[in-house]
């Protein structure tokens, strides 16, 4: 059986799909998936044994210059690739109009979430078979349930398995033991205060660990350099692609992450990870897997607010208690470096003694 899977983005969403593939592979021996995914994440599907082919798309890039996309033939080549292979089923695991639109170019039955379950209800109009999946569950579990209904098997009991082979990513000589700080994220409100990262780095180094800091853009590189400044066991890594970050993650003793796609990659690789949440809700999209601990800054006045811009107005008591210029957003003051260091120290041995 050959299935076309559409799950284009984001990084976390792509990683959340992997356990559903593992379920399907075990329930239906011989099943193969081709995966339509954004070009920037195209490497991840190749790590799963059930994926036979990857079909990159560049919707984000194409939308910026529609005329050039049609002119250079990239859109035509993409459509032709979908038509060249016979599929027994298409699963739109995104549940958006942009993903549902892509199903129009495949001559096979189309399955997806029903109008009450999809993120964009109109997407369900494109499907031949639509299935209910209750909201309010973690994204991984919702995808596992969608695949099980679409392919006709029972969802396995227990925690989902990403199905990745970590051994192929492990490096022969990783040097001194280290923890990885995944400090970069999209929303301004999801950033743990930089002063906290610095204080946490000092605490980890005092415990005999190195601190490694990846980055993906100039702003993240500058922040990493400020965190590491003057600390001889804090290492700012060179710029890495996803495969490079995965190799570093696979060798780490543990990880501290904000709400970021790389935190989900750490979970997929079974790296003990402490994830820090301020404005977002870890119950729905937190890191999923073994040795994953979530700390939520459940500030009573507002968190989780799910806002990209913090609108909280600090009180006189707030200003007396913390430095609101550097310790912001306010919800993160519940997750100070002392508390995070204590939780991380308790988590790290889990890798050696699960």
Image (cartoon, helix red, strand yellow):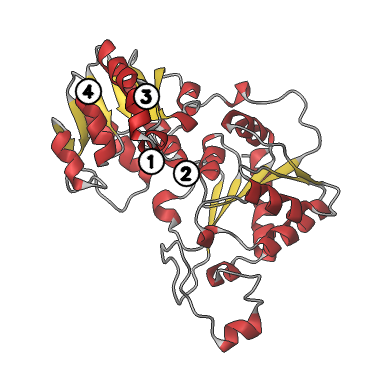
Which mark sits nearer the N-terminus, 1 or 3? Answer: 3
> What whole-number distance in Å separates the C-alpha atoms at marks 1 and 3?
17 Å
The residue tagged 3 is 35
> What whole-number distance in Å separates the C-alpha atoms at marks 2 and 4?
33 Å
Q: Is residue 114 visible?
A: no
Which mark's residue is nearer the viewer, 1 or 3?
3
Which mark sits nearer the N-terminus, 1 or 2? Answer: 1
Where does the N terminus fall, quadrant-wise? top left
> What whole-number distance in Å separates the C-alpha atoms at marks 3 and 4?
14 Å
At mark 2, the secondary structure is loop
Report if the CB atoms under discs 1 and 3 are less than 8 Å apart.
no
Which mark's residue is nearer the viewer, 3 or 4?
4
Residue drawn at x 45%, y 32% as measured from the top left: 161
Q: Quadrant of residue 125?
A: top left
Q: Position of residue 294 (x, y in %)?
A: 53, 55
The residue tagged 4 is 105
> What whole-number distance in Å separates the C-alpha atoms at marks 4 and 1?
27 Å
Which mark's residue is nearer the viewer, 2 or 4?
4
Report if the CB atoms under discs 1 and 2 are less than 8 Å apart.
yes
At mark 1, the secondary structure is helix
| Mark 1 nearby-residue class (10 Å; few <14, some 14–19, many ≥20) | many
Q: Position of residue 264 (x, y in %)?
A: 51, 42
Q: Is residue 24 above or below residue 257?
A: above
Which mark sits nearer the N-terminus, 3 or 2? Answer: 3
Residue 140 image label: 1
Q: Quadrant of residue 202?
A: bottom right
| Mark 2 nearby-residue class (10 Å; few <14, some 14–19, many ≥20) | many
At mark 3, the secondary structure is strand
Which mark's residue is nearer the viewer, 3 or 2?
3
Residue drawn at x 65%, y 64% as measured from the top left: 339
Residue 288 image label: 2
């Amino acid at each position: 059986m050959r299935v076309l899977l559409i799950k284009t983005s984001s990084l976390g969403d792509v990683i959340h799909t992997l356990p559903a593939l593992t379920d399907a592979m075990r329930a239906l021996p011989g099943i193969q998936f081709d995966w339509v995914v954004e070009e920037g994440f195209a490497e991840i599907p190749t790590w799963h044994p059930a994926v036979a082919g990857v079909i990159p798309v560049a919707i984000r890039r194409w939308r910026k210059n529609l005329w050039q996309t049609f002119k250079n033939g990239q859109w035509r080549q993409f459509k032709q690739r979908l038509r060249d292979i016979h599929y027994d089923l298409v699963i739109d695991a995104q549940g958006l109009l942009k993903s549902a639109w892509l199903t129009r170019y495949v001559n096979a039955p189309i399955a997806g979430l029903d109008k009450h379950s999809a993120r964009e209800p109109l997407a369900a109009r494109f499907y031949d078979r639509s299935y209910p999946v209750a909201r309010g569950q973690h994204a991984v579990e919702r995808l596992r349930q969608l695949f099980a209904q679409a392919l006709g098997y029972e969802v396995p009991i227990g925690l989902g398995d990403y199905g990745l082979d970590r051994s192929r990513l492990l490096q022969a000589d990783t040097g001194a033991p280290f923890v990885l700080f995944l400090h970069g994220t999209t929303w301004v409100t999801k950033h743990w205060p930089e002063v906290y990262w610095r204080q946490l780095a000092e605490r980890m180094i005092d415990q005999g660990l190195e601190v490694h800091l990846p980055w993906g853009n100039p702003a993240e590189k500058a922040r990493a350099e400020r965190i590491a400044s003057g600390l001889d066991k804090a290492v700012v890594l060179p710029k890495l692609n996803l495969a490079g970050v995965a190799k570093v993650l696979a060798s780490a003793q543990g990880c501290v992450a904000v709400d970021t796609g790389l935190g989900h990659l750490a979970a997929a690789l079974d790296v003990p990870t402490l994830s820090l949440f301020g404005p977002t809700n870890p119950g729905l999209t937190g890191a999923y897997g073994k040795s994953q601990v979530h700390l939520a800054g459940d500030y009573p006045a507002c968190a989780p607010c799910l806002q990209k811009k913090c609108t909280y107005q600090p009180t006189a008591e707030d200003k007396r208690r913390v430095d609101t210029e550097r310790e912001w957003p306010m919800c993160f003051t519940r997750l100070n470096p002392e508390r995070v260091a204590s939780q991380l120290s308790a988590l790290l041995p889990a890798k050696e003694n699960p």
